[in-house]
Image (cartoon, rainbow, N blue to C red):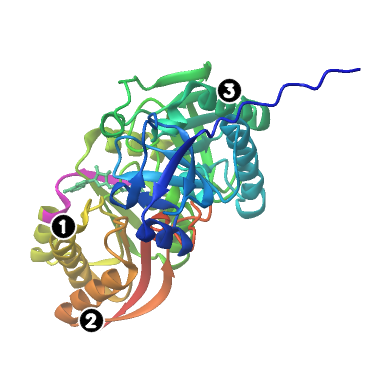
Amino acid sequence: MPMKPPAPTPEAQFSVKLSPRGVARLKSGHVWVYRSDVAAAEDVPPGALVRVTDPRGKFVGTALYSSSSQIAIRMISRDEVTDLPVLVAERVRAAIAYRKGIVSNTDAYRVVFSEGDFLPGLIVDRYNDVLSVQILTQAMDAEPVREAVLETLVSELKPAGIVERVGARIRDLEQLPPRRSGLLWGEKSATVITMNGGPVDGVRFHYDGLEGQKTGAFLDQRENYAAAAQYAHGEALDVFCYQGGFALHLAPRCSSVTGVDSSRPALEMAEKNTALNGRELEWIEGNAFDLLKEYAAAGRRYDTIVLDPPAFAKTKRDLDKALRGYKELNLRALKMLRPGGILVTCSCSFHVGPQDFLETVADAARDAHKSLRILENRTQAKDHPTLLSVPETSYLKCLISNVSV
Ligand code: SAH
């Protein structure tokens, strides 16, 4: 008689009990539970796969546990899960398949967006034949999970190289051992990407996986670049231009484009990108606040202005200061825009909600004695999916307006 195979040992042997408030939060559709709403988590190791229960011990789902983050619980399933690497591999494949329907005209896009793809703590970006991976949580950092991610990416996307970008502060907060950014797989870490079109009409950028901010480029603005280019005209100013994302998209539509940024390495890359696209643009290194003040005082005028500053509100406490910053920038830009001009104004601070942002721009318009007509009220590109019940997955605002006297 054939022997019965041994039953697999369930991995989710650890349990976390939530307070009634923690359960209510999950019922609302959110996937995070803060440590203050965890009633009991005895002997649960860092990064464990855990069974989550209500105060009476009734099973409510499976989650990833963090022993150090304020977000103690990140739900990954309403069902029992016993093999995390298998589930992660399945979800990475699903994320790749999801992009097939929503991403076109680009070889650079976000492949996995953490909670937005039901993979909390994992970010993967594709830059043509180079992939960039970021790991933000204890559970995703476990070796078997890393292996599952790499194997799936290699077999599904066949890259020439995979780099890991390490956020030292994030690893510190998650109490993970220090790690270096570098190549995880293959040979290649730098390449050229083409977005918003094919090899002939698309806009090209150099990408170096081991340099630059974020994972190298601001892919979340990809659809906004194309939208802004539709309305751009005349003399254009791209403020906080980084490596020229907006500026290079506006160039074919405008008589002149000037980009401003405080980072010299970013501008050096912008210059290389200009040559790559056969354009001539002007790049100015400086503090955007000072420069706008100076240009406004000197009576300079533009037909198109883009404002895409870094996140001013990193926490809720910074909100008032952030709103004052956005107001000042928008006010100065509006004063310099000619009638019929186009304002493209962005905020990537999650803590500044869409309504706060609209009110701040409206406030600036009032002070500048200008009327704005909204052309497009946009958000991040669709390859950075927003989960309706998880507000934190939506962070980018991009408002395109026509400015009248
Ligand atoms: N628009 C860019 C992304 C901008 S990110 C794109 O689409 O690619 C924000 C940029 O603001 C960074 O490049 C950073 O170097 C720059 N920056 C931050 N503070 C600044 C300041 N005070 N003045 C000018 N640039 C600044």
- Which three-letter amino acid code belongs to the residue tagged 1? Arg
Magenta extent: 279-289
Mark 1 lies on a secondary structure that is helix
Determine contact: label 3, label 1, CB under 8 Å. Answer: no
Q: Position of residue 314 (x, y in %)?
A: 23, 51
Q: Position of residue 84 (x, y in %)?
A: 56, 33
Q: CA distance from mark 2 to mark 1?
A: 30 Å
Q: Residue at x 21, y 53 (%)?
A: 315
Asked where in the image residue 102 lies, by quadrant, the reply is bottom right
Q: Position of residue 148 (x, y in %)?
A: 58, 27
Q: CA distance from mark 3 to mark 1?
A: 43 Å
Mark 3 / mark 1, whichever is N-terminal: 3
Mark 3 or mark 1, which is nearer to you? 1
Mark 2 / mark 1, whichever is N-terminal: 1
State the residue in front, 11 or 107: 11
Mark 2 or mark 1, which is nearer to you? 1
Position of 374 relative to 378 (above/below): below
What residue does disc 1 label? 317
Q: Is residue 288 magenta?
A: yes
Position of 198 relative to 226 (above/below): above
Mark 3 within 8 Å of ligand 1, using the beta carbon:
no
Q: Is residue 365 visible?
A: yes
**Which of the image's four quarters has the C terminus?**
bottom left
State the residue in front, 58 or 249: 58
What residue does disc 3 label? 160
- Which three-letter amino acid code belongs to the residue tagged 3? Ala
What residue does disc 2 label? 370
Q: Is residue 369 magenta?
A: no
